[in-house]
Image (tube, coloured by chain):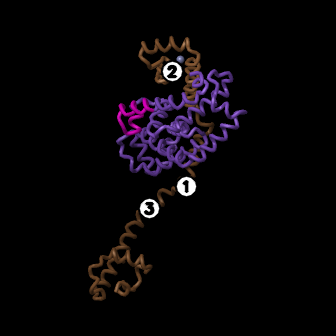
Amino acid sequence: MTDQELITGIVNREKPVIQYLVSTYHRQIIKTAFHFVQDMDDAEDLAQDVCIEILESAKQFRGSATFSTWIYRVTVNKSLNFIRKNKRKQLVRQFETFFSSSKQPGEVQHPEPAAENNGLHHEENRRLLEKAISLLPENQKIAFILSKYDGLSYKEVADIMNTSVASVESLLSRAKQNLQKNLISHFSEYANKK
Amino acid sequence: MSDCDTLRENLFAYSENELEPSLKEQLDRHVAGCGACSALVQQFNSMLGTIKTQSEAEPRPFAETRLQQRIENYLESAGKPLFSFSVRTLLQPAVISMGLMVALAIGILIGNGKAGKHASLTSATDLEMRHDLNIPENSNDDLINFTE
Ligand SMILES: [Zn+2]
């Protein structure tokens, strides 16, 4: 089905076309939303919002981007809005999981560099990285997540962000600088040895 | 700059194997002999490893079925596409023409000599003032009484 057939079908509320839309894009939408919000339930809720937005604004789709690029844009926007609205809720959640999975909170904040218990350390590492990513400026965050988690090419990320490949490279470079700076400061044992 | 600092400055690129060969070799040699840097690289690599597991996470079973159902529910309830579209397209011109008729009626009333000094009032200003003063748009009360 071409993008134009898809759009026409959606605008005309043709049931098989809408089913095709959900069937073809639900995985992409849920996965991308998950990479931003880090929660599968929230990602599924967001996928519903994204699909409804697509249904409601398909009429305005001008075809300057591909349909897939447009869906990515809507997904990123919905996810960022969700993060903005739920900042407090997420902080509480992070705080709760932070302490619930660790006997001694101090250990989580200053994890041992040499991972003995891989399962626990994996979860700690995941949360540390999630926290560090959440502190990135929004554009760096978008470029980093779409590139590293969604595995998109610089060109694809540039299309979604409506910018140039050079800008994406620059955003990624700054994101990496910020992340390594932030993460190194967490590795206190390393810092103490310095 | 010490090799420890150089590593810290280039940690991401080092872990992703994106450094130029000479710098990579230099840091490889350093990491092999520096416990702190070796531990740092190990920690950083396992942290980057979490990106892979997160990016491989799949939607839960029947996510598609649930989403199809939710979209169908939406279309059946709030969406009501065909109905709302036709109502909207019918109503919009109707509202506009009703508004124009009211404006016209007020304009005629004002023009009928009651409004001598206030002839410069546009119907829009008139409507605004009526709204501010809480006078129904279609009432025969004249604004003149209030503005004099
Ligand atoms: Zn060192």
Pick out the residue farthest to the right.
Answer: A103
Magenta region: which residues?
A: A157-174
Mark 1 crowdedness (10 Å alpha carbons): few <14, some 14-19, many ≥20:
few
Residue B76 bears which disc, if any? 1
Residue B102 bears which disc, if any? none
Q: Nearer the viewer, mark 2 or mark 1?
A: 2
Q: Circle 3 sits on which residue?
A: B86
Q: Of label 1 and label 3, which has the lower sequence position?
A: 1
Distance between the alpha carbons at the discs numbered 1 and 3: 16 Å
Q: Position of residue B47 (x, y in %)?
A: 57, 26
Distance between the alpha carbons at the discs numbered 2 and 1: 52 Å
The answer to whether B37 appears left or right of A3 in the picture is right
Chain letter, purple in picture: A
Name the kind of residue labelled 3 in the image. Answer: Ser
In this rendering, the answer to whether A48 lies above or below A116 is below
Residue B15 bears which disc, if any? 2
Badge 1: chain ID: B
Name the kind of residue labelled 1 in the image. Answer: Glu
Most frequent secondary structure within the magenta stretch = helix
Q: Are marks 2 and 1 in contact (CB under 8 Å)?
A: no
In percent of the image, x 44 and y 59: which residue is there?
Answer: B85
Badge 2: chain ID: B
Report whether the residue tagged 2 is closer than 8 Å to ligand 1.
no
Can the viewer see residue A2 in this picture? no
Q: Nearer the viewer, residue A86 or A5?
A: A86
Mark 2 crowdedness (10 Å alpha carbons): few <14, some 14-19, many ≥20:
some
